[in-house]
Amino acid sequence: KAGVTQTPRYLIKTRGQQVTLSCSPISGHRSVSWYQQTPGQGLQFLFEYFSETQRNKGNFPGRFSGRQFSNSRSEMNVSTLELGDSALYLCASSSGLAGNEQFFGPGTRLTVL
Amino acid sequence: KNQVEQSPQSLIILEGKNCTLQCNYTVSPFSNLRWYKQDTGRGPVSLTIMTFSENTKSNGRYTATLDADTKQSSLHITASQLSDSASYICVVTVYNNNDMRFGAGTRLTVKP
């Protein structure tokens, strides 16, 4: 099976802009979770989508949003970018059953200037 | 306070040496504990997963232990290689849902 893919891999934006990141989960997986990773902060949970519905949400401002399509692909959007949004954004897919392993994608490195 | 604490924050060892990374957690109720390896700029890759009843789990040169009573886990790396240089992240899953708690990771550097 192909792994989790994320596009783009690298992105440079300026403050105030908005950005959309894409994630294609492993075939057959219905759950997609998004994480932000910054140096020293570790992985911070953003949200999880399961069957096109947001199932869990982390403690991030409303500028961070997402959605999931019927084919389980997911997008994450960040509006009005701030310098502090510079991070590695990771997507993870799983079957969606409690406790099942998450498989991570390679991430999108976002730099906000 | 983070519910999953890892130590040390960073570690430098010589190639061929062994090392042990620690993970203490307060997550409750507990479902399972995973150790991930994350190379720089890449996504984490699962090394081991242990449930409440498992005390040890091996994956090649990686051996994880779990003491559910004291809520402690360790990851032992034997005969380290340069390719072991990475961040190692401890993740604890809350029982009966998909809620996961991540440690901040240990940054391991293996030098020749």
Image (cartoon, rainbow, N blue to C red):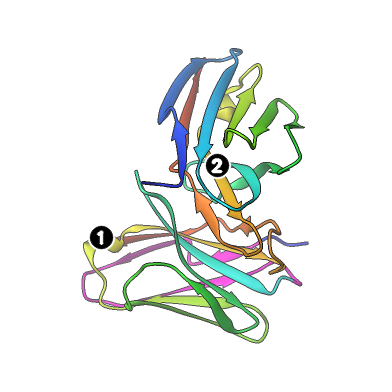
For mark 1, what is the residue? A84
Where does residue A19 sit, x and y in percent of width and height? 36, 75
Q: Look at 58% across and 12% down and name the residue there.
A: B17
Disc 1, SS: helix
Q: Residues within 10 Å of mark 2 (few under 14, many from 20)?
A: many
Cα–Cα span, label 2 and label 1: 25 Å
Residue B8, quarter of the rendered image: top left
Residues marked 2 and 1, same chain: no
- Figure check: B33 above or below A106: above
Instruction: Report the chain holding disc 1.
Output: A
Q: Look at 63% across and 45% down and name the residue there.
A: B33
What span is in magenta? A4-28
Which is more toward the observer, A89 or B75? B75
Q: What is the tally of numbered marks visible in this picture?
A: 2
Answer with left or right where residue A58 lies relative to residue B70: left
Residue reaching furthest to the front: B69
Which is more toward the observer, B32 or A66? B32
For mark 2, what is the residue? B90
